[in-house]
Amino acid sequence: MRFWEHDLPRQMTDLATHLEPGYGFDSIVVDEAQDFADAWWNPLLAALADGEIGGLYIFSDEGQRVFNRFGSPPVPLVPLLLDHNLRNTRQIATAFQPLVDHPMRFLGGDGPAVKFVACSQQDAMNVGDDEVELLLEQGWRPEDVALLTTGSRHPEQKERQAAGNAAYWDSFWDAEQVFYGHVLGFKGLERRAVVLVVNEVSAFERSRERLYVGLSRARDQLVVCGDPEFIRKVGGPDLARRLDIAWA
């Protein structure tokens, strides 16, 4: 942790301040800025070719903060609220709306209803595997499907990561394979169909954000597998209602 948030930013800042003329950037775009540490802004600003007129464009979603970092850029910015949802079908976007802190305009197309499969935390992984197989039987291509977990990683993910980080992410582009990942590593990514396995042992401070990230990764088809009471506790009664989770 010290390397990423202290040592490396200092090294990057030193390199950025000594860039040769013509090697600086006219503009820099930062995505997932809600998870930026304070020290990470210094090398970015130092890498601008012109600190006065250089562009800094930041995209941030507080609802997707999944790391305990609260850095803020040390320069004044003009905030613009992006409230149009284009990634997800209306059915998916409507389902996770209760986890968003502002109203959205749903501009995606129509798609199938979000599917919720009630199961225990212990059974969620196996149930998720069954749902992946069902999607493939229904005609979804492996390259269109991802299984994401909110708690422990899927055994297939562990096996692929054991082969190295590069090999693991190569599998993301493999047209012959379903992708297996964790919501923390899938921020900013998407798949046409996602099976979300809600398998955290117990709720904690960041559970709501993990749930939001997982629910918003699917473009066309979303399947959620988990304990109804856990999801109701973490996401609230409105989310439970939209996922068609009945009261016990």
Image: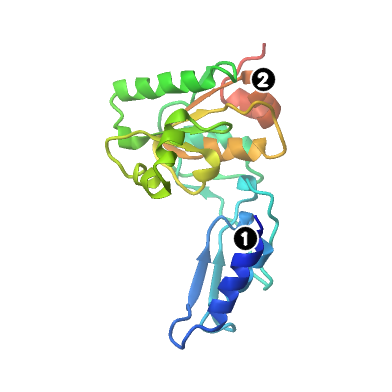
Q: What residue sits right under mark 1 in the picture?
A: 3
Rendered view: 69 above or below 78? above
Q: What residue sits right under mark 2 in the picture?
A: 229
Q: Position of residue 242 (x, y in %)?
A: 58, 26
Name the foreground residue: 162 vs 212: 162
Q: Mark 2 or mark 1: name the one nearer the start of the chain.
A: 1
Quadrant in the picture for residue 144: top left
Q: Position of residue 101 (x, y in %)?
A: 66, 45
Specify the amino acid type for callout 2: Glu
Mark nearest the camera among 2 and 1 is: 1
Q: Position of residue 80 (x, y in %)?
A: 60, 61
Q: Secondary structure at mark 2?
A: helix
Name the foreground residue: 173 vs 211: 173
Q: Secondary structure at mark 1?
A: helix
Name the image quarter holding the N terminus. bottom right
Specify the amino acid type for callout 1: Phe
Rendered view: 75 above or below 159? below
Name the foreground residue: 53 vs 206: 206
At 62% across and 19% down in the image, what residue appears? 228
Number of callouts in the render?
2
At 69% across and 27% down in the image, what residue appears? 202
